[in-house]
Image (spheres, helix red, strand yellow):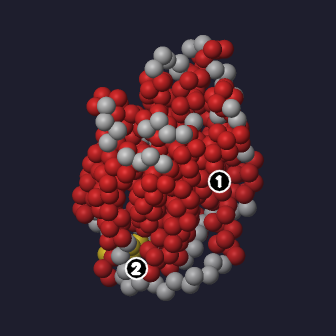
């Protein structure tokens, strides 16, 4: 295996056409990953309803705080899932790990979607929901590393950016589906029906992750790189700590600038607009729909651009820096908006920037690790970054707003997160790893 500095690499020619075999890989991997991320993130879109059902309180903000806190709980098992399932993917294979995560995610989703409310089951109800979130987090922690690594290794080096970009694109598709369901449900159901049973519909639909995900992934074959390196690293976590400790730390901090804006701008925005800004629920779901749509469309374009660039890092630096500078103006527009249009314009601007750097950022991290520990190498910092910064973002922002009474608190937190990420990215050493 050969690792060379990025400066010595020339940009490869990129064929814009996608071979039929790669289309199959993209479809199978993205569909399974998207369904799993849908199950994991749809909780946040309906946090207000879930809070009322399982964490009843006299103050709606308190109920929401408990609900988003439960959403954050699911992130604390992501690092464990990343270590266990990531190591399994490096030792046994990416495909086997992706199959495991499907079953685990389906069980967690069923626990939430089918659990009776607090009024029926008492204290057991929120405990079951928390257990479901923990199981979902464990599965999601291993899914991203295994699926992203599979995408990278499934095609030629000249197509890596485009292939890997379908990982964030599938997350956009999952968020888009969840947001669209939110729009449909809020428009077709009464507020009472939506609060009592309508919020369960996305979770029940999310149970399709098991049969659909298993079917499409059974059509895949293990990547040649994974087959050749299987078993080389008996303890991937030990090797990562010994040889790649600095890279892991910097990668974790880098992800702060993508996870915090994502979980605040995309997933928290429906609750922010309805509970804090007192706008109609439809406006919140439309903003999430727009963010998800831009992530779905722009991420593959970002991947194509990354394949044409000699270096990935400048593109990620540009998008991270612009997101940091625009956080305050964007929230200024949102907090002073009197209609949906300014909100959508502000959210769309910052979402487009995040999507532009998504594919290149993911590939930058993957290429920093050798194949024998690549799945763990991505999964662990990704899980740590999402857990420490993304999973807590909604809770922290809600607490800041409640404590300060200032809706702009969310903007300051986003800007600070992007600043830390930008500094870590400056120190991150860019590499190209072959194969």
- Dividing the picture into quadrants, the one containing residue 105 is top right
Q: Which residue is depicted at the point 32% across and 71% down? A: 314
Residue 362, x across and y down, in percent: 44, 62
Q: CA distance from mark 2 to mark 1?
A: 29 Å
Indicate left or right for 66 with 5 as reference. right
Badge 2: few (under 14), some or many (20 or more) residues near its Cα, within 10 Å? some
Q: Measured along the vertical axis of the image, is residue 277 above or below residue 166? A: above
Q: Which residue is mark 1?
A: 32
Front-most of residues 180 and 357: 180
Q: Within 10 Å of the Cα at label 1, are there few (<14), some (14-19), or many (20+) other Cα atoms?
A: many
Element at badge 2? loop
Looking at the rendered structure, the secondary structure element under dot 1 is: helix
Residue 284 seen:
yes
Residue sticking out furthest to the front: 338
Q: Earlier in the sequence, mark 2 or mark 1?
A: 1
Q: Nearer the viewer, residue 388 or 224?
A: 388
Residue at 64% of width from left, 39% of height from top? 186
Residue at point 63%, 49% (across, down): 180
Q: Circle 2 sits on which residue?
A: 309
Which residue is more in the foreground, 201 or 105?
201
């Amino acid at each position: 295996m050969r690792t060379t500095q990025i400066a010595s690499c020339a940009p490869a020619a990129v064929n814009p056409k996608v071979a039929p075999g790669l289309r199959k890989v993209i479809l199978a991997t993205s569909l399974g990953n998207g369904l799993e991320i849908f199950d994991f993130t749809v909780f946040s879109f309906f946090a207000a309803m879930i809070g009322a059902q399982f964490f009843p309180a006299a103050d709606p903000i308190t109920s929401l705080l408990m609900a988003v806190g439960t959403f954050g709980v699911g992130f604390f098992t992501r690092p464990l899932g990343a270590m266990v399932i990531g190591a399994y993917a490096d030792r046994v294979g990416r495909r086997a790990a992706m199959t495991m995560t499907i079953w685990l995610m389906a069980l967690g989703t069923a626990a939430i979607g089918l659990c009776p409310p607090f009024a029926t089951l008492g204290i057991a109800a929120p405990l079951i929901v928390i257990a479901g979130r923990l199981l979902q987090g464990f599965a999601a922690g291993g899914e991203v590393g295994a699926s992203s690594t599979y995408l990278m290794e499934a095609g030629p080096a000249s197509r890596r950016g485009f292939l890997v970009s379908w990982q964030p694109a599938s997350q956009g598709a999952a968020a888009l589906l969840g947001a669209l369901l939110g729009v449909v449900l809020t428009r077709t159901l009464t507020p009472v029906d939506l609060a009592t049973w309508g919020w369960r519909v996305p979770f029940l639909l999310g149970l399709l992750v098991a049969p659909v995900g298993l079917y499409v992934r059974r059509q895949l074959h293990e990547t040649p790189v994974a087959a050749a390196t299987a078993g080389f690293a008996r303890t991937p976590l030990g090797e990562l700590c010994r040889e790649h400790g600095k890279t892991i730390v910097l990668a974790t901090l880098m992800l702060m600038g993508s996870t915090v804006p994502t979980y605040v701008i995309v997933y928290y925005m429906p609750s922010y607009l309805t509970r804090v800004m007192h706008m109609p629920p439809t406006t919140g779901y439309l903003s999430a729909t727009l963010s998800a749509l831009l992530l779905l469309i722009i991420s593959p374009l970002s991947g194509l651009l990354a394949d044409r660039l000699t270096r990935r890092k400048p593109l990620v630096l540009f998008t991270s820096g612009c997101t940091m500078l625009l956080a305050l103006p964007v929230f200024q527009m949102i907090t002073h908006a009197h209609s949906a249009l300014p909100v959508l314009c502000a959210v769309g601007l910052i979402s487009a920037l995040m999507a532009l750097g998504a594919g290149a950022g993911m590939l930058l991290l993957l290429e920093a690790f050798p194949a024998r520990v690549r799945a763990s190498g991505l999964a662990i910092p990704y899980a740590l970054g999402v857990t420490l910064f993304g999973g807590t973002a909604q809770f922290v922002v809600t607490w800041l707003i409640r404590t300060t009474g200032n809706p702009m608190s969310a903007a300051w937190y986003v800007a600070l997160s992007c600043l830390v990420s930008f500094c870590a990215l400056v120190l991150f050493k860019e590499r190209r790893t072959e194969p």
